[in-house]
Image: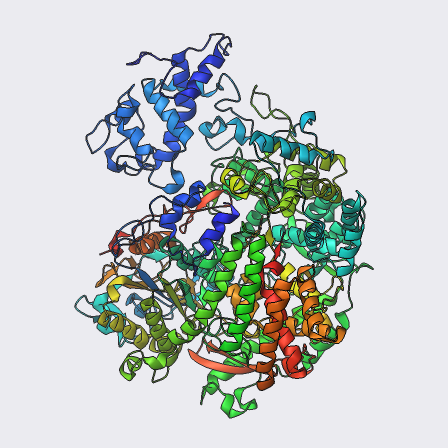
Amino acid sequence: MHFSKPMRLSWYGGLLLAQLFMASVGSVDAAGVKPSGDDLAELLFVKKVQPLFVEKCGGCHGERAKPIKGSYDMRSRATLLAGGESEEVAVVAGQPDQSPLLAAVQWINGMEMPPKENDRLTHVQIQWIRQWIAAGAPWPTADRRKQLSQQSWPETGTAGQIVKTSGGQSEQWTHRLYLDEHLWAYRSLGKPTIPTEFAAATGNGVDVFVNRKLSAAKLDSAPRADKRTLIRRATFDLTGLPPTAEEIQNFLADESPTAFAKLIDRLLESDRYGEQWGRHWLDVVRYADSAGFSNDYARPNAWRYRDYVIRAFNADKPYDQFIREQVAGDELAGDNPEHLIATGFLRMGPWEHTGMSVAAVTRQQYLDDITNIVGVTYLGQELRCAKCHDHKFDPIPTLDYYRMQAVFSPLQFADRDAAYLAVENTSAFATEKARLERLRKVDGVRGLDTVPHDQWPVDTFDADSETKGHDKVNKKREECLDRERKRYQPLALSVYSGPSRKFTSKQSIVKMPNRKQRKGKVAPIHLLLGGSIETPGVEVAPGVLSLIAGLQTELVSTSNEPVNTVEITKQTQGRRLDLANWLASPKNPLTARVMVNRIWQYHFGCAIAGNPNNFGQTGQKPSHPELLDFLARAFISSGWSIKKMHRVMMLSEVYQRSSRHPQAEQVSAVDPDNRLLTHFSPRRMTAEELRDTMLFVSQELNLEMGGLPARPMINLEAAMQPRHIMGSVGPAYQAMPTPAQRNRRTVYTQRTRTMRDPMMEVFNQPDLDLSCERRDSSTISPQVFTLFNGQNTHDRALAMADWLRQKYADVESRIDSAIELAYGRPATIAERVPCLSHYLKIVEHHRGHPPERTDLPEYVIREMVEEMTGLHFYWVEDLDVYRDYVPDLKPWDVSAETRALADICLVLLNSNEFIYVY
Amino acid sequence: MSIEHATRRSFLYGLGASLGAVAFSDLLAKEQVSPPASPIESSTTQIGHHVSKAKACIFLYMAGGPSHIDTFDPKPKLDQLHMQKFVRKDKFASAMASGQRYFVKSPFKFQRAGQSGIEMCEHWKHLADMADDLCVYRGCVAESINHPTANYHMNTGNRFGGDPAFGAWVNYGLGSENDNLPGFVVMPEVAHPQGGAANWSNGFLPPSLQGTALRAKGSPILNLNPPRGVTPKHQRHNLDLLSDLNRHHAEQHPNHDQLAARMQSYELAFRMQTEVPDLLDLAQEDARTQRLYGLDEEPTAKFGRNCLLARRLVEKGVRFVQLYAAGWDSHDYIERAHAQRLRSVDKPIAGLITDLKQRGLLESTLIVWTGEFGRSPDNGQRGGGQRMGRDHNAKGMAMFLAGGGVNAGHAIGATDELGEKAVEVVHPIKDLHVTLLHLMGLDDNKLTYFHGGRFKQLSQIGGVLIPELIA
């Protein structure tokens, strides 16, 4: 083959090919012939350039175009060079800079191709095209292309390599090349050695790897934080609460070198630890107490899964076991109710099936959801990307997606018998049960005529609409009560393996069928062409991600031997257990990395690999890859102990650095996101920490653990907000009747997908439908409305003020203590003075303005459009709890002095020092 | 994206920055550290990717699925087939749509309205006068036949929820013109629609882009005002103490830039407390205007009030206002139910178009009227009875656009002779989204946000323009 221009090594910045060329010298290809420069340019075309044309341009200028856009056909060399309707030559072979095609893919000179922002070529891809044009735009024959497509690049580690998978939907995908840097997550864990010159005084591996990078960047680290900062940081980190004054004093008094280590040990032993770290896990798995969509029905026993997670963290359950229980608890040996509860994981996503939905659609929706969430949670890999086509970036063929899906094909939903464990909190059962019995006996849907006329929203109403409407609403109410009532049975939100069964959301309990009904043929899983259930392709056997199915060290295809893979049984039983064992294998390159990366992020604010749910090509690459592997190895060799990981990370010098850096300007110029960890990044409290801490400083927090979801008081208007469900509106949210019941830790509060606590929402508690890899901490004005105006903060401030009033005799001590409670340090003069003068001013105001008493409503008037008549109808919904309710302390219960002190407390709870952790 | 960048975006809704994603896109996509070298020109003609007339959108959402057959798409054939029975066999039909069925004719008469002769049912009494301002579209197809998933699809592009709503994308793209108000305001009926607030979610976009639900009753924005008994002066004093403490704290942490942002947000919120109620005070409108929207009578007062508020919000620079009118799910007795629904929205919508026109705002406002899907030409036997209603239909529906840049005075697309499925100018919802974004000056393919491993967009995977809808 001859080109208009001979190949040279010194192409336009053609580093890539030049490297390849040099690397290939001396190597011998399969035919025993040394590849020449010509071969390399052809290889570049076959392996890189043509697939790029097909993928990025083919939709308009190639196979998939109907018709060809702009008369520009990129399917042959002649037409590709000739150009389209502009009648301008598109490619001048050998002259990349005179080729309009190259300008177009660079989005310069007016032409922007491909036109989608999403599809823009990367710098590397543009270089391929440039080099290919420079080499004379070779276009080998079809036979030659086929021959070349079997070849790999002559040298790995430079431009890309073929990897071994179960194979894509096209040859091109199967043989496509991956840059080495994009495969890091799938390779076996490295064995990083600790370079002695960076070994820190702490002897901690974390310090070694972090300090080495700092040294390379010529940056100094911040000094160690002071002890007050450290105890506050560590206590919030491990428990989600501030330290008490006594704990601070003890820590300050302990001058031994092991003081911090002792502190960490104490915190890890606290039950508060599991509540805080369990909550992180619940973010990832999307824990909620309801099902979402039309009815958003309660999932009465979801709380048992929540408590299982908290217990697992407190007990330091080995992570591999934690995985097995959640993915396949029902298939594990022994009849342990705990294992059935753990499988609640498999049912955490939003899902419903009603008479208006199509069974095949909702089943597929579930299968897609569980396939993806297993990938996201344990493998840091969004698998959904491979549902409709082979993964665009990562070595995950569509076939693998459906292989994984086939693992879940026998999975059926069931509310399974699981006796209450001694540790499970059933204390609220009696009162809640009694309430439901009461509700069942009363007429819950009253007409407007049962309330005073002046409260009617209208003067008249349509009697027919009322009758029809009330019927439907009543029916729905009974359905909901029935569901609530059944939460007290010892059932676990769980699954079993068996043939397909009908399952509708309407049934409040679906028990496991008998043994006979659990036998039978499992529904086959087909590869769905284009992801559509209407176009099933080949039937697929269960399997795992083929790239790492063999847990091999070598990802790269060096021979045609089949991959020695982990087998997933084809039997009905045991598919998930096989999957779980593969996930939990120490040889699985992703599992340990993904988990230590998550742990790291919660400690440091930023993960080592920046997207804990995405270890693929589009996720951020690890800032400290060796550190990640070092930690992953340590994790596995510790017996998958999460608590040991906390110790390793927190006892590092890195963790204990001050958030103030002496050369802050210089550091932020070099490393604005603090990925090199010169200092500790301050963080805003999460929504839950904020609420819990307010209750903590107001001395109201009830540390009772577990049990039925607690219902704290939330914004009253949001609580009354009607939400459409099928045929009715959802019941009003009513807070629990006593302060102790309401003032539980936030992790125990009810999470209803369509009825969220607005305070949680504005402070970035994530959406309950999506897995959250990291929380945002935005600053928006609705937060101010919530925190400065909201009743909750006012109530907490008043309780705090009243406690201070009882404890201290004079206003100065009360103010000093308020500051110390809020900030965990003594007040300064600069704070005491303005607080005191504010107090004196505001107390006068309060003396002149006695508060007006307001009571909670005892009912709410509902309205809806009756669909049969098109007219509105109305009913009265009783707020039964508020008839017998113990309110929080209110302004009319206390003196003007306490109210003035409460203003100071309110300001403190809103202040920056309170809400940031340093 | 780094925390710092996320925060910079979240300042919209109001801490000064009012640039849209178009200006910020490079910053976001490429994670550059420095702000863009030349901020986008905020000329009056182009604020998005291309020049467009519409700068704001009022989205009239008819929850429940209004029947195309009884509003904009007459089917005389059904008069002949009325009450004839048949059985539908479709493996992908829900329980609702299968079994023994019968055809149902429309109970309504149709008229050809305006010079354009657009077909409209008899209950569009006022809107018929506006026919030449409407672009009726009868070719759209939804995918889901269940309310929440169909709502999510129409509002967010994703049937299963969790993604940003159209209004969030528009604000993300165009930014805010009023830093003291949210750019995306939603006026639900008193009850939230099926699927709830996820219908106006910011999804994975910054939280400042979430639709702010203006509540029909009570406090328009949650906690806009302090508890009873706290006066503005009292609050100002508290705020002053807060600034004092925060200033003192900031001195200890000079490099923590979040602190200043948080302090500013308190001042902004304090200002909003007076501005928002003023904006919502309809007593400032004269009686003629109030009558125009039907505020003085039933059954139009409620929706009329929301339509008038929408105009006031758009005037103040709110980018996207979505109004809900529920109750269109007429499985039974469609004659009564749909007639009543039509009467309640007809005059307010006509009033809104007239008013916007009078004020010269119609050209710069895009109006969209649609539900989540259409309705079937037939009904199922339920409870042993035959009731004149219609079930859900994802394959045929009707909607209309009006205002900036739309191909007014035309009815585009058609369903088959039964109204069962779209057969002309057929496009899925993603194409509608692409087209609506285009009318707002935005290019769906460029309005992207990196999340979950890829650049995401409203249409999910890209769509095509529906040129017939564009003037």
Q: Name the residue nearer the viewer: A606 or A447.
A: A606
Q: Name the residue nearer the viewer: A893 or B49.
A: A893
Asked if one can make out residue A883 in the rendered structure from this viewpoint, the answer is: no
- Residue B43 shown left or right of residue A514 in the figure: left
Q: Where is residue A426 in the image (x, y as percent from the top left)?
A: 77, 66
Image mark count: 0
Above or below A49: residue A717: below
Outermost residue on the left side: it is B115
The scheme the figure's colours follow is rainbow
Q: Where is residue A764 in the image (x, y as percent from the top left)?
A: 55, 57
Asked if one can make out residue A153 in the rendered structure from this viewpoint, the answer is: yes
- Residue A188 shown left or right of residue B374 in the figure: right
Q: Name the residue nearer the viewer: A748 or A413.
A: A748
Residue drawn at x 47%, y 27% is A176
Which quarter of the rendering shows the N terminus of chain A?
top left
Q: Position of residue A95 (x, y in %)?
A: 28, 21
Above or below A454: residue B106: above
- Residue A872 shown left or right of residue B361 in the figure: right
- Residue B394 shown left or right of residue A784 in the figure: left
Image quadrant where residue A852 sits: bottom right
Residue drawn at x 54%, y 78% is B230
Q: Position of residue A911 (x, y in %)?
A: 58, 63
Above or below A362: residue A833: below
Residue drawn at x 29%, y 84% is B287
Above or below A652: residue B120: below
Outermost residue on the bottom side: it is A453
